[in-house]
Image: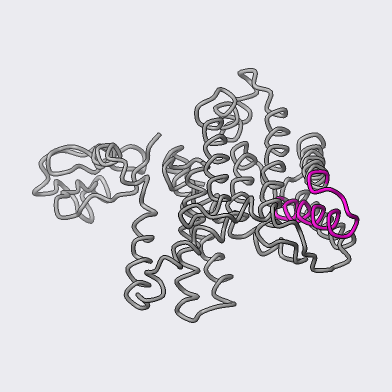
Amino acid sequence: MAVSSDTPNSSFLSVAVRGLSSSGAGFGGKTRGVPAAHQANGSRETILLSDGSSPNTVRRQLSRLGLHRVAIFVPWIGFIIIFGALRPDAFLSAGSLFAILNSQSPLVFLAIAIVPTLVVGDFDLSVAANAAFTSTIIATMTTIYGWSLWSAIALGVLSALIIGLTSAFLVVGLRLNSIIMTLGMATLIDGIATLISGSQTLSGLSSEFTAAFTFRVFGVQLSVFYILVVAAILAYVLQSTPLGRQMTFTGQAPKAAKLVGINTDRLRYGAYVGGALLASLSGIAAVASQGGITPGLSGSQLLPAFAAAFFSTVVFTIGKFNVWGTVVAIYFLTTGIVGLQILGLSGWVTDVFYGGALVLAVAGFTVARRRITGERD
């Protein structure tokens, strides 16, 4: 259901206001200049336009244009204009454009990995640690123990799936809180990764493996094309298949979903395992892009990934987590970070920007959900 956030212009609104009491105190009586009557419904009042229609009608008419679905592009264009005006030589350059596109592939995969569990109504805070664990497995097995690259990748992906299945068992099987359990799982995984790598910065992966992600086609790295493929597949599953519709129904109304015969537990298990698989792709992209690993970076990736996932609820499909909105949100946030860094702001600005973005994204999601469902609390 589309929801418009546009507010009708007050210049063409004539508001019918209910009297404060039946005796006519306050405004009292009839309101002059109002062409149509109003009706009270409980504590609510019907607001009429000058042509006798309601603002809801205007919202529906405006929502048909679909402009609310691309509202994120307004501040995005604002970023480009402001940063371009302040530093045109640095920001409005091909180098900045390709830096925005090519530098965020692991983060985009990570943000996409969060979407399945959010769709079914759960939180998986272990995805960033899971991705970092996959990177650690690949780098450690190949550079220290001499494993073949494909064997190390297979072990890393298998480890990620086991972690996802374990999280699903704790949350779905044992009915434990998803936030607490996956946060604890993330801490556990980070500790094991540190033990395996010995807190070392590892490098020296094969150039062929690195080139498979960093080779550029017209300036764009291959990893960006992998993102488009993965995003297209997941978006199709979530939006155009019975499985995706059941997952959405499970997240929005789990009790009702059970009543109509949907196996919600199985879908939630699948969401955790699917998210873990996508997290392993993020880990593979990270270790390939960097040519190795630097311990202790998983925590810095979780906040922007969640911010992007929640931003998706106000992009394209209002009130629902969606893949393409998540991808767009990552590059939107990256544009702001790159622009601020070009202006000489670094370090603290990243945390402030991503933290503020997450607050705004969650607020936008909450407002959109309330407007769709009619909930107030």
Give the residue drawn at x 80%, y 52%. 138
Q: Is residue 140 left or right of residue 302?
A: right
Q: Is residue 362 magenta?
A: no
Q: Is residue 197 left or right of residue 25?
A: right
- Residue 145, by quadrant, is bottom right
Residue 192 vs residue 210, the one in the foreground: 210
- Residue 26, by quadrant, is bottom left
Dominant secondary structure of the magenta stretch? helix
Residue 204 vs residue 18, the one in the foreground: 204
In the picture, the quarter occupied by the N terminus is top left
Q: Is residue 140 magenta?
A: yes
Q: Which residues are magenta?
A: 127-151
Extreme-bottom residue of the structure:
344
Give the residue drawn at x 36%, y 55%. 73
Residue 12 picture location, percent across and down: 14, 50
Give the residue drawn at x 36%, y 48%. 70
Residue 80 picture location, percent across and down: 36, 66
Residue 220 picture location, percent across and down: 50, 55
Give the residue drawn at x 43%, y 47%. 315
Residue 81 picture location, percent across and down: 32, 68
Residue 34 vs residue 256, the one in the foreground: 256
Extreme-top residue of the structure:
261
